[in-house]
Image (spheres, helix red, strand yellow):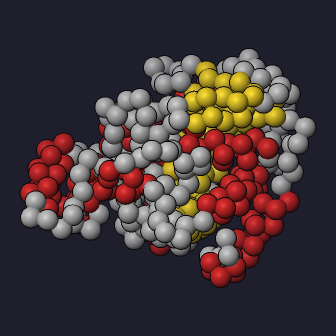
Amino acid sequence: MRADRLDASLRNPQAVFLLAAALALPVAAQAAVGVTEIAGKDGSGPVTVFYPSSSEEQPLKRGPFTLDFAWQGAPVRGNGRLVVVSHGSGGSPWVHSDLARTLVESGFVVASPEHRGDNYKDLSAVGPESWKRRPAEVSRAIDAVGQDPRFAPLLALDKVGMFGTSAGGHTALSLAGGRWSPALFKEHCEADIAEDFHSCVGALARLDGGFLDGLKKTIALVVIRWRFDDKTWYTHAEPRIAAIVAAVPYAVDFDMDSLAAPRVPLGLVSARQDKWLPPRFHSERVLRACAACVRLLDFPNGGHGALLSPFPPGLSGTLAELLDDPPGFDRSALPGMNRRIAAFFSKHLLP
């Protein structure tokens, strides 16, 4: 990223520390990155695990991606810490595999649970229904890795890291101590559906300035009012998690007072050109409420798909409009972002 595009946050001491730590992170050059899949616990989906390995990396085909990993490679000891990665709606582990590689090269084991009803194979429970159970699926992913005989001897699970993006960012905020309710989701959509349409309806439709826009908003609100009037507060306590990063998180349905003092260190990544979850309604609201939070990075030209790496090819229609990179976005900045996230976890999880 060009110097004149660096975020102003680099001028504050904590950001400078994180950047210095990122540049100083040791790279486990002697170890490859292994990957395996283990069964989820108690009905949860499978968990993809990335880890330091003594085996040789080979091309691995997963969906549209060909990636170099040591499939079922022999695990070796890293730094003894686990980071759980929670994917976004309709997501998979593979669009975060570059981040996983950086974390593994820094010594971490990385676990990515497949969220039931909200993944690339199954979209039957996208939205609040999935958000209610995602945090518990993170807990069960920690259990699954901790009970696997290959990884149990290599890990101490008293200090686990957690990263989530988009809907996974919502999961991250829940685990940081935030409380949310479907009723707040409904109230937000009633007040701001015209300016935050995709936050309310996803990629199912778009407003294009045509005469049908009013009808689209009316239909959306009828459905939202019917399905999401639950005023219950939802949260989830996971004492093993000791540091969290939320990237472009879904946040409008949170009680912001509950995020004013997160129970663990909380870092955020935002993207100014995010058309799916506009920062002023989501990530910026969290940062305004939380004086203790750290802005790890703010992409001035980044869209909602900025953190997907590798980026899924062949998107079309509304999904492409929401996820494709805006003009001027420089993907060469992503390795630096991944190192900064790894530095944040190293600072808070390692002795």
Residue 159 in sight here? no
How far from the left and from the top, in percent, is residue 132?
A: 38, 39
Quadrant of residue 138 within the rendered picture: top right
Q: Position of residue 127 (x, y in %)?
A: 33, 43
Quarter containing the N terminus: bottom right
Instruction: Say if 23 sits above or below 115 in the image.
Output: below
Residue drawn 43% across the image and 34% down it: 120
Whether residue 337 sits left or right of residue 288 in the image: it is: right
Q: Residue 206: percent from the left, percent from the top?
A: 24, 57
Image location of residue 22, percent across then percent down: 78, 60
Name the residue at 10% across, 59% down.
212
Rendered position, 166 above or below 114 = below
**Quarter of the image where one finds residue 97:** top right
Q: Is residue 129 left or right of residue 7?
A: left
Measuring 87% from the left and 51% from the top, which residue is drawn there? 26
Query: Which of 126/261 is in front?
Result: 126
Residue 148 as seen in the image, left or right of residue 303: right
Q: Is residue 117 above or below residue 232?
A: above
Instruction: From the viewer's side, name the closer residue of 216 and 58.
Output: 58
